[in-house]
Image (tube, grey):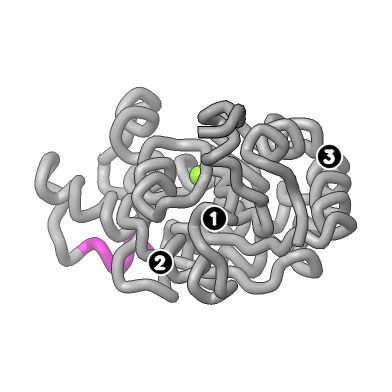
Amino acid sequence: MDDKSSDDWVKDMIKAVIFDLDGVLIDARDWHYEALNKSLNLFGLNISRDDHIVTYDGLPTKRKLEMLSMDRGLPNKLHTFINKMKQVYTMELIFTQCKPTFHHEYALSQLKKHNVRMAVCSNSIRKTLDLMVGKAGLDRYFEFTLSNQDVSKPKPDPEIYIKAINKMGLTPSECLIVEDNANGIKAAEASGGHILKVNSPKDVHWDNILTRAKKLGGLGN
Ligand SMILES: [Mg+2]
């Protein structure tokens, strides 16, 4: 053994940052919550704020509806209609409320300056993902984005992160994944990538990303 501390042996250079979208780059968790409830309310159903935080947050709508059928007797034949209405209400909210955020723009431009590659992995459908990334003005930073329609199993399965890491031709230890909720973190952990856990999009800023990357071994290609 030489005099290197054991920490030195696990240091990894971060070559890519992979962002979750909802609750990370976009404050859309409430929009999804509100839009789904508005659709469920048409049939007298409602997801409480507590149930949302503990159980449903971060899952795709399809999965949430399956759970509501199992637990609360929502007829399966209503899934398609509720899903359609949820998408209409979500689009309305994105159009009126989604806009660029200065500290995200700054963080991503700094990452680009440091030659760090960037991608998005989201449990949202493609249409919603594209609209949100575009309205937030961040589309030009990403090499690619993956929606829940690009994988066979959404988060908490790690498939979406494994696919992104492979697509970049990197190893998991060269990637930092920014996630905000339990289902997303479960997926990120199982992919083998490093994780920066945030509580809200407010935590996603340059200092935070840089500090985490430095601890892991640095930033850049
Ligand atoms: Mg999220």
> How busy is the neighbourhood of tag 1: few (under 14 within 10 Å), some, or many (20 plus)?
many
> Where is mark 2, residue-wise?
84
- Mark 3 or mark 2, earlier in chain: 2
Looking at the picture, which amino acid does disc 3 mark? His
Decide whether residue 115 is among the magenta residues. Answer: no
- Mark 2 or mark 1, earlier in chain: 2
**Viewer can see residue 221:** yes
**Viewer can see residue 21:** no
> Where is mark 3, residue-wise?
103
Image check: 53 left or right of 112?
left
Residue lying at the far front of the rendered structure: 1
> Where is mark 1, residue-wise?
90
Q: Give the vertical position of 217 relative to 110 (above or below).
A: above
Looking at the picture, which amino acid does disc 2 mark? Lys
Looking at the picture, which amino acid does disc 1 mark? Thr
Tell me, for residue 30, which label it has, or none. Answer: none
Q: Residues under labels 2 and 1: Cα distance?
A: 10 Å
Residue 76: x, y in percent?
15, 61
**Ligand 1 lies under 8 Å from the Cβ of mark 3:** no
Q: Quadrant of residue 202?
A: top right
Could you tell me which residue is drawn at 36 percent across and 64 percent down? 159
Image check: 11 left or right of 162?
right
